[in-house]
Image: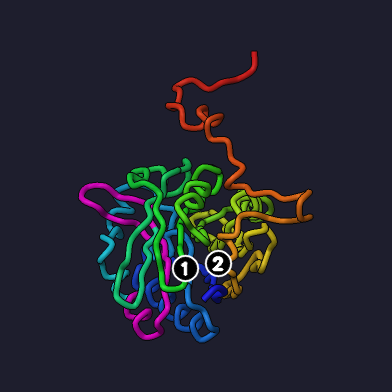
Amino acid sequence: MSQIQIACVQMDCEIGNVESNRRKITERMLAAVDGGASLVIFPECAVTGYCFDSLEEAAAFAEPLDGKSAQTIADACRKTGAYAIAGFIERAGTALFNAAMLVGPDGPIGTYRKVHLPYLGVDRFLTPGDQPFSVFQLPFGKIGINICYDSSFPEAARSLKLLGAEIIALPTNWPTAAWRNPAYVINTRANENHINFAAVNRVGTERGWDFIGRSKVVDFNGDTLGEAGREGEEILFAKVDLQEANNNRIVNVAGSYEIDKIADRRPEFYSAVVAAKSSRSHSAD
């Protein structure tokens, strides 16, 4: 199967009201599958909310990957045969992570822990992701996951592409100042990596922070397949061609205008990208 229907669930959630958020996720999951979706993606921290004021406050709502939220979502996956990605705060030992769970009919499959943490919301207090980027093989294709601020770092999406991902799911919580992400960044990440991209934002206001919606699905050419509104809950459906994301050679004019953004890379010149981070910022004198 090359083309699949995905659903991006743009929703509001109530901070700290995990039971209510779980119910809403389950309801939207069933509605999305009724619309033909095989993969349903929810926002960052959809289970918990995002704007916690301390680590202690957030810790009360953290769960392991195999916790009640994943089991609740897995029940919906079993009923429908679909797969889901949802943001939550993951507890692993004494560490807490901003994470996204991938769940299927047989239960939790894996988790991605947000690597790049902005000084914003609960990310101010959590532990940065401690696992390498990885790709999940599902029956219909290869799925990579980033979360929100990760999309500001080209290396994150490029890593997933090089690992074989055919689509990147980006659960996110974009506030007002992040409007350039749906306007420019998501299409750029898709285009520069020849990969499908699905960014799923929340809506509503939480502790004074306004979230801007505009969930978006972009194909491997960087063309927008669908975009949700600025306000209001909705389910954005889009058909994406996963297999075509592997055909990296683009023939615009045979024999005179052909490009391959993977084969044409020159990694021997990219050492500055992976050099150890300096404690000093570089600026012009």
Q: Amino acid at mark 2?
A: Gln
Residue that badge 2 annotates: 243
Q: Residues within 10 Å of mark 2 (few under 14, many from 20)?
A: some
Looking at the image, which is closer to me, 155 or 175? 155
| Labels in figure, total | 2
Display colour scheme: rainbow
Judge left or right: residue 206 versus residue 110. Answer: right
Q: Is residue 140 above or below residue 173?
A: below
Looking at the image, which is closer to me, 24 or 102? 102
Element type at marker 1?
Answer: strand
Q: Is residue 11 above or below residue 177?
A: below
Q: Is residue 232 visible?
A: yes
User: Residue 183 location in percent, x, y?
Assistant: 68, 54
Residue that badge 1 annotates: 141
Q: Name the N-terminal-most of marks 2 and 1.
A: 1
Q: Which residues are magenta?
A: 73-99
Residue 96 forms part of the magenta stretch:
yes
Q: Residues within 10 Å of mark 1 (few under 14, many from 20)?
A: some
Residue at figure coordinates x 58%, y 47% from the top left = 262
Residue at figure coordinates x 60%, y 51% from the top left = 189
Residue 30 forms part of the magenta stretch:
no
Q: Are marks 2 and 1 in contact (CB under 8 Å)?
A: yes
